[in-house]
């Protein structure tokens, strides 16, 4: 900013020279432009035929994704308005588990139409009131067209999972991966509540995605050294220890000054006695496998090995906690605390090539979805995609309300909002009609990304919904209008509900902005 006061506006004259400010039309223009830039980036990713983005991070790692939240996160947004949209995407993921692209598209369309309304003389407050009224009408219609299902209706849960997986890098295996997602949720739900913390996703290189499977328990990093014959797999008794196993914590860290051979011999005998005592205490429980967060003394390990007890040491805290949850076996904090109640049964398998151990049980308290792939970038995308599928299946259990996909919910809401708008007084009616137009951006984008004429598709959709076909959506294979619910294209109600509420909240915030003040970053002093 120039320091010449004669060229500065009255507002600029009161600002520090390190501050850049925009007000009124300049500020609003910045808001609309920034949001549209974000929409342009993610808008082409929606639908089964949405396109991907290739991302290269600072470390040179490459990933390919069409997940809007992942794309925005990797853009490292610095524009303050764009960061509001990034926060919008994060809120959608946190509350609904999916639908970020829909939310961003809808918010961008609302702002785009608000810009047109502003040029026609509508005040932002009037636009906000019209949008809020239309939002209430739209959500009422959304509730009316939703159908209720139970997680026990596996076919519906599979439809929801497959709808999420289509159009991603998991498309070719959307069926088997949907089965994995539903299986995982079924294991950790009581039919209503779903404990998503009891589902863990693990990835490994070297095998095809088709080899992915559900582990009825946990997989931890680490495998025993030595020959396989020394550590048999199969059914074992085990104990979990959140501690190290050493005969004397100090004995490994200090030097012992013995005045004579007799003193030294006594010390060595005492050390052997403590070592034997530890091994005896563990062996007395009949433990085949001891899993520890700390280290295991070599002498103790050797004694236990002779008694056919395997030790897995230095297991991470998260691995230990998840394993404890999966097996229903709380870890003890010292060897002295080990007792018969600290022992359980499980089936163990060692993957020495990848340094992993898998422990399963017949009635696990937690499960692991093990995913395989050939590259890290591919696995990262599959991990995100399957995680989304698990999230939406969990909504079937916790909420139960399901909608037809393919843009059908947006068209149902738009149809009702247009009908209601005739009874809205004043200029708010224009905002309500603009809200309906914005809703249609979603099916329009789905049709466009699938390669069809969006105008023709929208006209057909409007006609279908005008005659009461509330599940009519875009058939992305033919470009025609079809019953998407009957075709198995289904989405959780909560995803659409939050998409509408989050978008309206973000637009309300952005429309109230009439000034943007930015301070330059202060260079760190050396």
Image: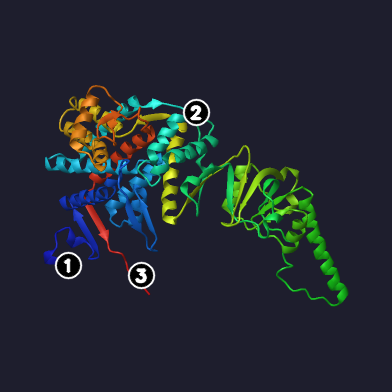
Label 2 Cα neighbours within 10 Å, binned few <14 / some 14-19 / many ≥20: few
Q: Quadrant of the N terminus?
A: bottom left
Residue labelled with disc 3: 524
405, above or below 382, in the image: above
At 73% across and 53% down in the image, what residue appears? 309
Number of numbered tags placed on the structure image: 3
Residue labelled with disc 2: 152
**What is the spatial separation of the Cα atoms under label 3 and label 2, in whole angstroms?**
58 Å
Q: Nearer the viewer, mark 3 or mark 2?
A: 2
At 17% across and 67% down in the image, what residue appears? 2
The tag on residue 114 is none
The reply to whether residue 213 is in sight is yes
At 82% across and 75% down in the image, what residue appears? 258
- Where on the picture, by quarter, is residue 495? top left
Element at label 3: loop
Q: Position of residue 17 (x, y in %)?
A: 22, 66
Element at label 2: loop
Q: Are marks 3 and 2 in contact (CB under 8 Å)?
A: no
Q: Is residue 430 left or right of residue 447?
A: left
Mark 3 or 2, nearer chain start: 2
Q: Is residue 31 left or right of residue 89?
A: left
Q: How is the image coloured?
A: rainbow
Q: Give the residue furthest to the top.
A: 467
The tag on residue 2 is 1
**What is the spatial separation of the Cα atoms under label 3 and label 1, in whole angstroms?**
23 Å
Mark 1 or 2, nearer chain start: 1
285, above or below 272, in the image: above
Q: Position of residue 29 (x, y in %)?
A: 18, 50
Q: Position of residue 32 (x, y in %)?
A: 21, 48
> In front here: 169 or 346?
169
Element at label 1: loop
Q: Position of residue 447 (x, y in %)?
A: 25, 38
């Amino acid at each position: 900013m120039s320091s010449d006061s004669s060229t500065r506006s009255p507002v600029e004259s009161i600002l520090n020279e390190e501050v850049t400010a925009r007000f009124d039309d300049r500020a609003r223009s910045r808001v609309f432009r920034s949001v549209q830039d974000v929409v342009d980036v993610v808008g082409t990713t929606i639908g089964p035929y949405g396109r991907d983005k290739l991302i290269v991070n600072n470390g040179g790692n490459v990933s390919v994704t069409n997940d809007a939240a992942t794309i925005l996160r990797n853009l490292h947004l610095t524009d303050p308005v764009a960061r509001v949209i990034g926060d919008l995407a994060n809120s959608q993921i946190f509350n609904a588990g999916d639908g970020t692209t829909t939310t961003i598209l809808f918010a961008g369309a609302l702002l785009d139409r608000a810009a047109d309304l502003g040029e026609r003389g509508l005040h932002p407050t009037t636009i906000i009131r019209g949008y809020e009224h239309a939002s209430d009408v739209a959500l009422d219609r959304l509730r009316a067209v939703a159908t209720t299902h139970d997680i026990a209706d596996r076919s519906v849960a599979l439809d929801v999972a497959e709808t999420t997986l289509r159009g991603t890098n998991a498309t070719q295996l959307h069926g088997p991966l949907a089965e994995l997602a539903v299986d995982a949720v079924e294991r950790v739900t009581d039919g209503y509540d779903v404990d998503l913390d009891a589902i863990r996703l693990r990835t490994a290189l070297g095998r095809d995605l088709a080899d992915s499977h559900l582990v009825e328990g946990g997989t931890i990093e680490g495998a025993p050294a030595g020959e396989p014959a020394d550590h048999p797999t199969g059914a074992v008794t085990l104990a979990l220890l959140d501690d190290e196993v050493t005969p004397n914590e100090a004995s490994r860290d200090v030097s012992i000054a013995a005045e004579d051979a007799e003193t030294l011999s006594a010390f060595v005998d005492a050390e052997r006695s403590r070592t034997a005592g530890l091994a005896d205490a563990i062996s007395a429980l009949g433990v085949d496998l001891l899993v520890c967060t700390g280290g295991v003394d070599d002498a103790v390990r050797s004694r236990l090995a002779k008694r056919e007890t395997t030790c897995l040491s230095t297991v991470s805290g998260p691995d230990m906690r998840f394993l404890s949850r999966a097996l229903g076996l709380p870890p003890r904090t010292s060897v002295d605390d080990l007792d018969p109640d600290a022992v359980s049964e499980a089936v163990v398998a060692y993957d020495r090539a990848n340094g992993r151990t898998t422990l399963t049980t017949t009635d696990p308290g937690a499960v692991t979805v093990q995913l395989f792939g050939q590259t890290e970038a591919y696995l990262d995308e599959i991990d995100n995609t399957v995680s989304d599928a698990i999230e939406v299946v969990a909504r079937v259990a916790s909420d139960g309300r399901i909608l037809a996909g393919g843009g059908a919910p947006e068209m149902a809401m738009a149809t009702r909002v247009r009908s209601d708008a005739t009874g809205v007084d004043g200029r708010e009616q224009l905002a309500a009609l603009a809200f309906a137009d914005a809703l249609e951006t979603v099916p329009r984008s789905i049709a466009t990304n699938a390669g069809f004429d969006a105008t023709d598709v929208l006209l057909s959709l409007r006609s279908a919904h005008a005659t009461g076909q509330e599940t009519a959506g875009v058939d992305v294979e033919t470009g025609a209008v079809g019953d998407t619910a009957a075709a198995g294209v289904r989405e959780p109600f909560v995803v659409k509900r939050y998409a509408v509420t989050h978008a309206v909240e973000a637009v309300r915030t952005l429309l109230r902005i009439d000034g943007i003040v930015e301070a330059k970053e202060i260079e760190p002093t050396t």
